[in-house]
Amino acid sequence: MTGDASSTSEATAARIGIVGLGTIGRIHAERLDRLGADLAGADLDRDAREAFAEEFDAQSYEDHRALLDAGVDAVVVCVPNRFHEEVAVDALAAGADVLVEKPLAHSVESAERIAAAAREAAGFCSVGFTMRYATPTQRAIELREAGRFGSLSHVRVDYLRRGGVPGGGDGWFTDPELAGGGVAMDLGVHVVDLALHLLDYPAVAEVTAETRSEFGDYPVEDSVTALLRCADGATVAVDASWHGTCAPSRECVIRGTDAGATFDVTETSLAVVDADSDATADPVSLGENEMHLAEDRALLDAVAGDGDPPGGTVEAALTVQRVLAALYESSERGEAVRLDGGRD
């Protein structure tokens, strides 16, 4: 191991296979290693396999099926979106628990097939919505459950970058055949899930959106703005950009009848605004905020049977996938698109 598991979580003997050893695969590997997991990896790229094997003293395989044949307790799916289905379905069929990096798939149809396989599987399948593990997000959920906000009416979430096109625009993130879209499939999936998660996943009735490609020579959008109207009357505003003429932001604003809250998922504080006061309370410090570490700790706990699966359920992820499809349709048609949403 390369880190001290005792400082983060009790060591575990769970064997975790990581399929796809690029940036996000290595992020998971580093944190799972710190938490005491026994790692294995798979990637078509020989250099990536060799670097992974050397750094983590782990077995690596060219094919995910060989990794499954060798035996793992769980699989973290970190390949391009188009290949999520193949790896996730094979892993579930092999009896492994599965954490799929967001989004669930590159299309609604593929996402539905993963969800169908998950419903029949012995193991769990969850999706890596890491913003759920931000410390201020978790505090906001506690306040909601305690009734602090009253009836929630609106949530706004931004994920805005400056010069943040993955791979500089030359990788699979800007290939619609592999990614299924652009920034909406990369960052937009986070903000849609976070907003719906804070509202306790009401059914989404209607989506209005606009996508734009302004700053790169690629066939996908680099910014998206959307408004969601929920069946219970709540609304959601989301804004995501890889590269925009604005300050970087990962801000969330919650509005309720009794109070609201504002936080940034990268920070360690949350500020509450009461309905009967003009003042905003001083932000409350909440301590450690390392989203991926918290998510991977939850994965190990769930594999051991000591907690709920990490991130979002496959059904929540399927809802997000349908919202994203409606978002693209709305932008193309230039009008609102109605959905028959279901509660997570």
Image: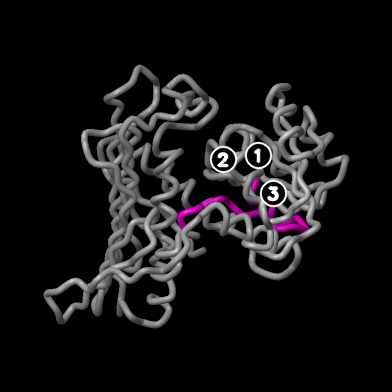
Q: Residues within 10 Å of mark 1 (few under 14, many from 20)?
A: many
The image quadrant of residue 259 is bottom left
What residue type is disc 2 on? Ala
Q: Residues within 10 Å of mark 3 (few under 14, many from 20)?
A: many
Label 2 and label 3: CA atoms lie apart by: 27 Å
Query: Which residue: 45% across, 29% down?
Result: 166
Q: Which residue is mark 3?
A: 33
Q: Which residue is mark 1?
A: 85
Q: Which residue is mark 2?
A: 105
Residue 51 place in picture, x, y as percent: 70, 29
Query: Which residue: 73% across, 22% down?
Result: 46
Describe residue 333's horizontal placement relative to residue 24 as left or right: left
Q: Visible in this render: residue 342?
A: yes
Q: Residues within 10 Å of mark 2 (few under 14, many from 20)?
A: many
Describe residue 23's horizontal placement relative to residue 249 as left or right: right
Question: Is 260 drawn above or below residue 57 in the view shown?
Answer: below
Query: Which residue: 68% across, 58% down?
Result: 5
The image quadrant of residue 84 is top right
Residue 135 place in picture, x, y as percent: 45, 64
Q: Secondary structure at mark 3?
A: helix
What residue type is disc 3 on? Asp
Of callouts 3 and 1, which one flags the residue occurring earlier in the amino acid sequence?
3
Of callouts 2 and 3, which one flags the residue occurring earlier in the amino acid sequence?
3
Q: Secondary structure at mark 2?
A: loop
Q: Nearer the viewer, mark 2 or mark 3?
A: 3
Question: Is 20 drawn above or below residue 251 in the view shown?
Answer: above
The range drawn in magenta is 114-132
Is residue 300 or residue 57 the one in the foreground? Answer: 57
Mark 2 near mark 3, Cβ–Cβ under 8 Å?
Answer: no
Describe residue 107's horizontal placement relative to residue 210 as left or right: right
Residue 147 place in picture, x, y as percent: 36, 82
